Image (cartoon, rainbow, N blue to C red):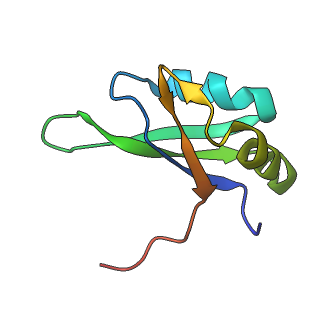
Amino acid sequence: MDSAKLFVGNIEYSASEEDLSQFFSQAGSVVSAKIITFPDTGRSKGFGFVEMSSVEEAETALNTLDGQELNGRPLAIKEARPQQPR
């Protein structure tokens, strides 16, 4: 892994950024947790990003938390890719 930032998919719509942060704190120190929302409604799009304090902690999170349930839904965790220009 090159980055400590992770993509998190299949997030339950009622989950909060605090829920996500607490869940990932099992694997280490969480720098930030962001759930992506629709701009017009503020409703969750069901995915987000978590940044861990080190690449090693991000790898630990990926290896141990991928497929684990948060609020009844198994999370799909991958290494985040750089945002593509639109």
Q: Is residue 42 left or right of residue 30?
A: left
Q: Look at the image and tell me in which quarter the C terminus lies.
A: bottom left
| Up/down of 28 relative to 45, above or below | above
| Up/down of 28 relative to 71, above or below | below
Residue that protrudes farthest toward the left in the picture: 40
**Image-quadrant location for residue 32:** top right
Residue that protrudes farthest toward the bottom in the picture: 85
Q: Is residue 59 left or right of residue 75?
A: right
Q: Is residue 9 left or right of residue 39?
A: right
Q: Look at the image and tell me in which quarter the N terminus lies.
A: bottom right
**Image-quadrant location for residue 79:** bottom right
The x and y percentages for residue 68 are 63, 32
| Up/down of 58 relative to 24, above or below | below
The x and y percentages for residue 8 are 52, 46
The x and y percentages for residue 81 are 55, 69
Residue for point 72% across, 63% down: 3
Residue for point 47% across, 21% down: 72
Number of numbered tags placed on the structure image? 0
Q: Is residue 45 left or right of residue 76?
A: left
Residue for point 53% across, 22% down: 18
The x and y percentages for residue 7 are 54, 53
Residue for point 72% across, 48% down: 62
